Amino acid sequence: MSTKEKSLNFIEQIIEEDIKNGLPTEKLHFRFPPEPNGYLHLGHASSICLNFGLGIKYNAPVNLRFDDTNPSKEEQEFVDAIKHDVEWLGYKWANEVYASDYFQQLYDWAFQMIKDGKAYVDSQSSEEMAQQKGTPSTVGVDSPYRNRSVEENLDLFERMKNGEFEEGTHILRAKIDMAHTNMLMRDPIMYRIMKKTHHRTQNDWCIYPMYDWAHGESDYLESISHSFCTLEFLPHRELYDWFLDQVVADENIRPKQREFARRNLSHTVVSKRKLARLVNEGFVTGWDDPRMSTISGLRRRGYTAASIRNYADTIGIAKRDNLIDVSLLEFCVREDLNKITPRVMAVLDPVKLVITNYPEGQEEWLDAENNPEEEVMTFRKVPFSKELYIEREDFKEEANSKFFRLTLGKEVRLKNAYIIKGESVVKDENGNITEIHATYDADSRSGSGSEASKRKVKGTIHWVSVPHAVEAEVRIYDRLFVDENPDGNKEVDFIDFINPNSLEVVKGYLEPSLSTAVEGDKFQFQRLGYFCVDKESSANALVFNKTVGLRDTWAKVEQK
C-alpha cells in the first residue's frame, strides 16, 4: 500500500474501492442535505467540509439539498442562513435542490407501492401504533388495517392528499415486516397528514413524506453516488436500501449510504433542538449569539472561515463518536488571526497614568507596527500625550521581583513610546488608586536609535492617550457551559450547566485608529486577545466582541 493510500480516511477508502470496482469517476456526485429548521452549527461545518472537500478532491459536483419535508418547523429564514453559511465557508454547490422538488414523484412512487401491495393506509392512533410496534426484544403486531384492499388504500391515500381528513386520522405505511429485528423496518411511516403552509409549495399539499422515504429517493433522483451521514443513521441504512429497491432502475446510479461519527465539542451543545431551546427561552440573544456553536455565531464572534475549515480538517473523519476539546477550535482561530490581524492598543480596565514631566498640552504621533507577521512591515501613527490610560492590573504599588510591569521606583517601557518610572499614586477616600504619577525619559523613545532607547527594561505595557481615546462597548465572551459535556448526563438538564459568567460587558478605551472600524473587522488588542467589530456597532457607538484570548486560560482554571 502506498503512502498516499495509507493517508486516506475511511470515507475516501470507500470511494477509491468503488472506483476500483468499476464506478466511473465522472459518476461521482455528493450532496450536503440540511433540514431548514434551524441554523447550522459546528457539526454541520464538519459535514460541509467533508462533502464539499470530496467534491474538490474528485472534481465532482456537490448538491446543496434542503430536506424540507416538515413545514411545521421549516422557514425561508433558515434556508437563506444555510446558503450564506456554506458560501461563507468558501464552497460552491453545483445545484440548489429541495426534497419538495420531488413531492409529485414521491407521491407517484408511493401510489405505485400501494398498487404493488407494499404500502397501506393505517388509521390507528399514534398511541395504538406505538403499542403494537413491539420492542427490540419482542416482535410487533400487525395493524388491523394492514390487509386493507388495494382499492381502499388508493382511495384513502388520494383523499388524504386532497385534504379530506384531519391530521392524525390516517398515515401511509410501508408493508415490510412487523417481526423484523430492526425496529425501523416494522412498517415505517411514509406519509402523514399536515395541513401546514410549506415555505415553497405553499398549500399545494396536505400530506408530506417522512425523512426516511424522501431522503434516499431524493439521492436517487439527483444521481448521488455516495450519501454520507452521521452514525445515528446507521440503523436507517437498511430502510434506505429497501426503499431504493422499490424504485431503482438498473441503468441508473444507485446511491450508497455510509456513516461517519459525530465530533461533539466540549463546553457546548451541537443539537439544533437544544440550540433552539437556548434561543427560545432567552438564554442567548439569538441563533447568532457569539456564545453559540452555530456557524453564524462563530462568524459574529470573529472566527474566520479558514479557521473552521482547518479545525474540520484537523479533527478528521472517524467511525466513533467522541468529544473534541474546544481549546483545539480556539487554537485554530488563534493561529489564523495571528497571521491576519493588525495589532492595536486598547485598555479595558483603565486607570489614569499621568507623566508629570511631559510638557503640558504637547502630543506626539508615534510609529506603531501593524503586524509583525507581515512580509513587508507596515506602520500606523498612534498619539501620545501627558495623560494615558493603562490596564489596572499593569500597576502594583508594591511588587516582588517577578512583577515586570509598572510599580513605584521601577522602570517599564510603554509600547512604541518611552521608558517611564513609577513615582507616586493618588487615591480616593476608599483607598482606591485613581491616578498613577510617573516620569519619562525623553531620550528613550522606541526606534529613535538613541542610547537610552536601547536600554533594556524587563516589562513593556500598552496604553491609550486619554484625550485621543475612543470609547467602545466591549463584550467579553466565555464558554457557554461550565461542564465540558453538558449533554452527557441524561439525568441532568443541560441548561443547569450554563455558565452565568459567559458574558461580561465593559467600557473600553481604544486608540483612535479604530474609530473607523466596521462590522467584521478583526484586530489583536495587544496583550489582551483577538476582537472583532459586532454587527450592532455604529460609527457613534462602537461594539467589539472578544473572539479568543492570546492563550488558553481555561486549562489552568479547570486544573484548579
Image (cartoon, rainbow, N blue to C red):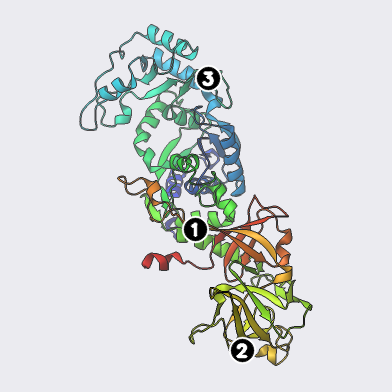
Vertical comparison of 379 with 506: above or below: below
Q: Is residue 261 visible?
A: no
Instruction: Give the left or right position of residue 177, taking residue 453 as reference.
Output: left
**Which of 234 and 169 lies nearest the eye of the viewer?**
169
Element on which disc 3 rests: helix
The quarter of the picture where residue 152 lies is top left
Tell me the residue that label 1 is attached to. Answer: 478
Identify which amino acid the numbered label 1 is placed on: Asp
User: What residue sits 68% from the left and 75% below the top?
Assistant: 388
Q: Is residue 312 above or below residue 361?
A: above
Q: Which residue is mark 3?
A: 104
Provide the secondary structure element on which disc 1 rests: loop
What is the distance, in whole Å, between disc 3 and disc 2 at their CAs?
A: 78 Å
Q: Earlier in the sequence, mark 1 or mark 2?
A: 2
Q: Quadrant of the N terminus?
A: bottom left
Snapshot quadrant of residue 556: bottom left
Q: Which residue is mark 2?
A: 456
Q: In which image quadrant can residue 124 be found?
A: top left
Q: Quadrant of the C terminus?
A: bottom left
**Front disc: 3 or 2:** 2
Estimate the x, y position of residue 127 in percent, counting from the top left: 30, 22
- Tag in front: 1 or 3: 1
**Tag 3: amino acid:** Gln
Residue in view at x 49 percent, y 13 percent: 163
Q: Note whether 364 is above or below 85 in the view shown.
A: below
- Which is more toward the observer, 543 or 170? 543
Report x, y in % for residue 392: 57, 73
x and y, in percent, of residue 95 in the image: 60, 36
Q: Nearer the viewer, residue 64 or 421?
A: 421
